[in-house]
Image (spheres, rainbow, N blue to C red):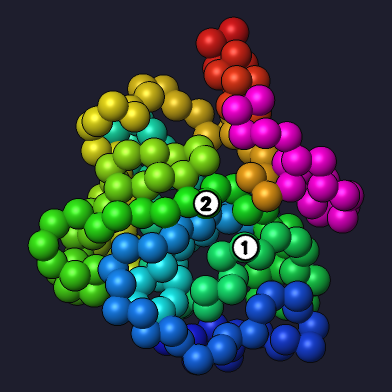
């Protein structure tokens, strides 16, 4: 997929989303990752990896999980420009993907294995380690070939020191950029960022209450 498809779906005179520039051919297979919580027609999470100068992207209806027993659908969508990674705000009604967008997590990732990221994607078995503010550890995206529209993958947590059985994504429904909830973003309320450690402590307390 290319950034042409991203641009075709959007009118940048009407949406605050960033326009695509020229793809940056960095040649690196490891870089940044971003996850946006997107309340559009349906609430979902947009999982993005910086690969080959763009953000390879998957729409994950139930979001990723730190529980390895959970296997969630991840539909591969068009590439997004690198500038999209930090995007948070509201896409106006009448535009593609209209609704509120939260920067739910961000950090860096390392590719696992000897094959390049594009080779692993072509094979349908992309393995990586995340170093995020909410998500940590090893994951895999597995392509469910010959299924549905052909863009269906599964995102699965590998067993490692970061596994949390019963992990509930709803305990972490706040922005890592501004500290806002989805409702606060939708209402264009100002940022009130709390340190991640404070938020995580509150989430863990709620989880074990």
> The C terminus appears in which quarter of the rendering?
top right
Q: Which residue is mark 2?
A: 106
Residue drawn 58% across and 86% down? Answer: 20
**Residue 168 point in image, percent of width and height:** 50, 29
Please name whichever residue, 4 or 133, is drawn nearer the observer in this view of the structure.
133
Residue drawn 32% across and 39% down? Answer: 137
Residue 86: assigned label: 1
Q: Are marks 2 and 1 in contact (CB under 8 Å)?
A: yes
Residue drawn 44% across and 77% down? Answer: 54
Q: Within 10 angstroms of label 2, few (less than 14), some, or many (20 or more) residues?
A: many
**Residue 122 point in image, percent of width and height:** 19, 73
Please name whichever residue, 40 or 204, is drawn nearer the observer in this view of the structure.
204
Magenta part of the protein: which range?
Answer: 178-198
**Residue 97 point in image, percent of width and height:** 65, 69
Q: Is residue 159 left or right of residue 24?
A: left
**Residue 8 point in image, percent of width and height:** 58, 91
Residue drawn 66% across and 64% down? Answer: 87
Q: Is residue 183 magenta?
A: yes
Q: Is residue 8 magenta?
A: no
* Quarter-of-image position of residue 207: top right
Q: Is residue 164 left or right of residue 176?
A: left
* Quarter-of-image position of residue 33: bottom left
Marks 2/1: CA distance? 8 Å
């Amino acid at each position: 997929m290319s950034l042409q498809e991203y641009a075709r779906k959007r009118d940048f005179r009407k949406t605050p989303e960033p326009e695509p520039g020229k793809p940056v051919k960095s040649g690196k297979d490891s870089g940044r990752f971003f996850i946006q919580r997107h309340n559009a027609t349906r609430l979902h999470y947009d999982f993005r990896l910086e690969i080959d100068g763009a953000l390879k992207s998957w729409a994950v209806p139930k979001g990723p999980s730190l529980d390895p027993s959970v296997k969630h659908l991840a539909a591969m969508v068009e590439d997004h420009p690198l500038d999209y990674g930090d995007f948070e705000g509201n896409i106006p009604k009448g535009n593609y993907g209209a609704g509120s967008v939260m920067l739910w997590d961000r950090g860096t990732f390392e590719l696992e294995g000897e094959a390049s990221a594009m080779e692993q994607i072509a094979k349908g078995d992309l393995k990586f380690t995340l170093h995020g503010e909410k998500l940590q550890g090893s994951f895999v995206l597995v392509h469910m070939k010959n299924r549905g529209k052909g863009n269906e993958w599964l995102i699965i947590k590998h067993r490692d020191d970061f596994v949390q059985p019963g992990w509930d994504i709803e305990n972490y429904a706040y922005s890592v950029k501004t500290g806002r909830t989805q409702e606060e973003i939708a209402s264009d309320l100002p940022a009130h960022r709390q340190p991640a450690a404070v938020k995580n402590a509150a989430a863990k307390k709620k989880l074990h209450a």
